[in-house]
Amino acid sequence: MEIKKGIGVSPGVVISTALVLDAEDLAIPRRHVDDAEVDREVDRFHTAVQRSLAELATLRATMTEKYSKEIGGILDFHISMLKDRTIAQPVVNTIREQKVTAEYAVSVILRRYASNFLAMTDRYLSDRVKDVYDIERRILHNLVGQRQESLAHLTNNVVVIAHDLLPSQTAALDREHVRGFATDVGGRTSHTAIVARALGIPAVVGLGNITTEVSSGDPIIIDGNRGVVIINPDDEQLAEHREYERRQKVLEIELKELVNLPAVTLDGHRVSLQANIEFPNEVDSAIAGGAEAIGLYRTEFLYLAAEQEPTEEDHFRAYAESLTRLKGRPLVIRTLDLGADKYTQSKAAVPERNPFLGDRSIRMCLHDIPMFKRQLRAIMRSSVLGDVRVMFPMISTLMELRQAKMILNDVLEELEDEGQPFRRDIPIGMMVEVPSAALMPTQFAREVNFFSIGTNDLVQYTLAVDRTNEKVAGLFCPAHPAILILVRDVIRAAQRNQISVSVCGEMAGEPLYTLLLLGLGLTVFSMNAPDIGEVKKVIRSTTLEHARHVARKVMSFDSERQVMHFLREETRKIVPEAF
Amino acid sequence: MQFVDLANRFKSNVRVIAYGNTVQEADGKSVMQMIILAAVEGTRLRIAADGEDAQAAVNELTDLVKSGFGEEMSEHGN
């Protein structure tokens, strides 16, 4: 048994079996497999080699016409390596004799050749080591590819162990069978954390080297509440956690009873609790969890789930499905908010030096208008099917907002010319998540129908903290007085201009901030569906007057510690079981 | 890699022995082993094959090496 401490980023306890994912560009740890799995590993190796050969053959066919004979020669060399029995045979032997994964065996054998090559004095020959690395990467890629496919079709419940989950991996997850996550790196707002909370499954991140310490098939406990992972638990641990699991379920049932009750304070002030989603099929569970609307539909997953950019029809199908499931409830579609993530950076021809300040989100869309228009056309076409609203992310200047609106107008004209039906009056909103926008909300409020405050990015940009860097993640705190001033001012400006305003960042779903946001005048909270119960409980247990008093007091503090301490005390007073 | 490609067309096993500072042997059908062997320049090579088409293999491979590399060699088939 081994207990590892990390950061619990999504609550809950799960007892399950580990499934370890390999990531590219990482050392492949020695990983043992059961006797029964040896044949499967050998098959996986052969399949990966076949796929690699097929890839190279395709490449070879296009290359020789376009480029010099030399490149064709290099590819021939790669093909010869893949066919070389002095590679294949030792790999298979290693898998069989040492009972290890195909990944591990491939790495060991090819790296042995690589070191032989490196030792050679002939420059031409020692340079061939690059080809060996290249072929290793290709085979591993095809092995990992198989793993990812198998992730989409699991038969047993598992918890996924990875260095860091990539958006493209989570998009392919079999959501039925994945019961938890544990990763080497990451913080409270990492992609893994966001996905885990959206799925309502426990996750622990920042575990250091969990991928090397767990093997697929190991029994494992993930305790997202305490940020603990137990590998190969003993009977006592199992019993303790089964009891814990049971108590959690009781609490969940209590919260479920709140589902059909309105989010209204004791003095009759009504607010709207909405859900953030990534996939159309999350709509049902969001409504079942008490969401009155979808306050944030993140459309990035449309791009991440497929190999190529989604077509207008792909967009349309997703929006139409969401609207059908919503049965008249509002759907706020955020336009593409990609960039500055591993996925786009790894695909970029030239990686950006400072991606979070780079070509991301609305900027990326304004640089690729045909792509942007495809999405806008689909949104507008879906407008006749329900209550659609469109929201532009990461607006930092009025010019950007106006440009985006102009492109939307172009789209409307195009649709009109084509005779396609759409609604002209759909609300247009923007995310307030860049400090420049949060500092001049009045000017922006005149040009949109609603604001949505994205606290994650607002905190990152205002406090200059990269939330995925474990070394500084501790500085990432929505309770920082600077953030609270911005949030307050944005809410005020919206009220004065009579437009609606919501918070759709993590802050909205944390019961710790419910009293404060309510007191600042927020009426729309959009969060991950599993958080709705607890937030609703706080709202139903207080009065607007009291919340205003709390907010006034909080705004007088000058440190995030004071803010958090006070909010914790006040929340505990009204909902003792919240913390 | 012409050598390896040609060697792979025969059913026989092909071994290449290099008489350099040390005597090294490589699988003539393995591009990896041949690269490591070929590092020794100007060496005397011996090509050996065993199997049903051994003689043809040795003849053709020897011709290839003679035409391409012009190195000193001896022939041996069995």
Image: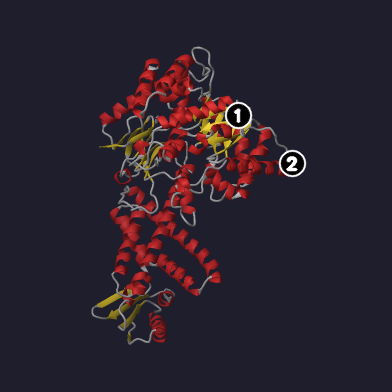
In screen coordinates, is A4 left or right of A442?
A: left
In screen coordinates, is A7 left or right of A171?
A: left
Q: Position of residue A416 (x, y in %)?
A: 74, 41
| Residue situated in front as seen by the camera: A79 or A317 | A317
- Circle count: 2
Disc sitting over residue A416 in the figure: 2
Disc sitting over residue A148 in the figure: none
Q: Indicate the amino acid at tag 2.
A: Glu
Query: Judging from the image, what secondary structure is the residue with disc 1 in?
Result: loop
Question: Dot 1, crowdedness within 10 Å: few (<14), some or many (≥20)?
Answer: some
User: What residue sits 51% from the left and 67% below the top?
Assistant: A60
| Res. A434 in view | no
In screen coordinates, is A350 left or right of A448?
A: left
Residue bearing mark 1? A330
| Residue situated in front as seen by the camera: A34 or A330 | A330
Q: Does residue B42 lie above or below A440 as drawn?
A: below
What's the chain of the residue with tag 1? A
Q: Position of residue A42 (x, y in %)?
A: 38, 55
User: What residue sits 37% from the left and 25% below the top?
Assistant: A557
Q: Indicate the amino acid at tag 1.
A: Pro
